[in-house]
Image: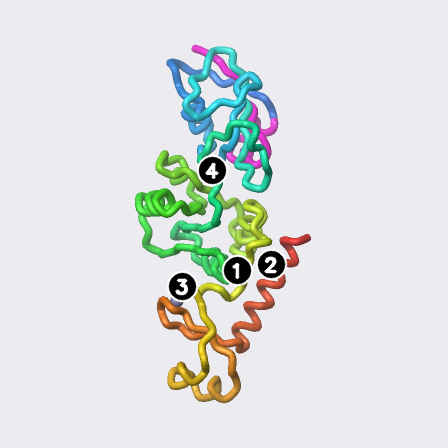
Amino acid sequence: MKQATFRFYAELNDFLPPQKRQVAFSHSFEGRPSVKDLIEALGVPHTEVDLILANGESVDFSYIVQDGDRISVYPVFEAFDITPILRVRPKPLRVVRFVLDTHLGRLAAYLRLLGFDTLYRNDYGDEELARTSREERRILLTRDRGLLKRSMVTHGYCVRETDPRRQVLEVVRHFDLWRQVEPFRRCLRCNGLLEAVAKEEIADRLPPRTRQHYDEFFICRTCGRVYWKGPHVERMTGLVRDILEQVER
Ligand SMILES: [Zn+2]
């Protein structure tokens, strides 16, 4: 048996059993495993890892762990510039786009409300989620750690919170997105882009009271859903304001 000392930093500790959190611990192994294999065997999805140091030198996922190595593992630093050091992952996505696992429907609606390009269906399979994330360079959000361990997934994040409003805050904070928030840009139902539309164009589709009381309308160019600044939008605006205030704090 060989042994290496591991130390995980920051939120990577969430994936470890309590006795291994925030401390250096010894891990026994056999054969010639890569550092990626050992990190995942310890329960940490590789998509959460941005930087690995072996005996103080940055290494990539394929590094073969040696007997006696000291391995330090750091989380994805989307928000910080550590470019002089080798990163283990591809370049961060320039335009942040998401694809969400089936259990995150309300989070999907909140992200769309804030203007983020967010794919969501309640019947995506794991394989399809992983493939969509890779092919369309979308960050895969899920609470399923097993899904993030698939090697096809290069950009993923395990959402810790369970309440959707706390989830959206967690995501905006984690990826440092608050400067990119653009409310009422996307259709909540289908993720299509919204455009202002003249009242005459859609008047025949409006309930009589709406036609009477509102003048400003938006239409989803993908699914045709019409939005207006009625009480529903007032409520959503309030929610966006709450979210921004919490994020900016
Ligand atoms: Zn739509």
| Badge 2 element | helix
Of pointers 2 and 1, the one earlier in the residue sequence: 1
Residue 91, which numbered label?
4
Q: Is mark 3 within 8 Å of ligand 1?
A: yes
Direction from residue 173 to residue 67 in the image, left or right: left
Of pointers 1 and 4, the one earlier in the residue sequence: 4
| Badge 4 element | loop
Direction from residue 75 to residue 249 in the image, left or right: right
Up/down of 109 relative to 9, above or below: below
Q: Position of residue 104 (x, y in %)?
A: 44, 53
Q: Amino acid at mark 1?
A: Leu
| Badge 1 element | loop
Q: Is mark 1 within 8 Å of ligand 1?
A: no
Which residue is found at the position 49% from the left and 36% from the top? 48
Residue hosting label 1: 114
Q: CA distance from mark 2 to mark 1?
A: 9 Å
Q: CA distance from mark 3 to mark 4?
A: 27 Å
Q: Is residue 131 magenta?
A: no
Of the 4 image quadrants, the one containing the N terminus is top left
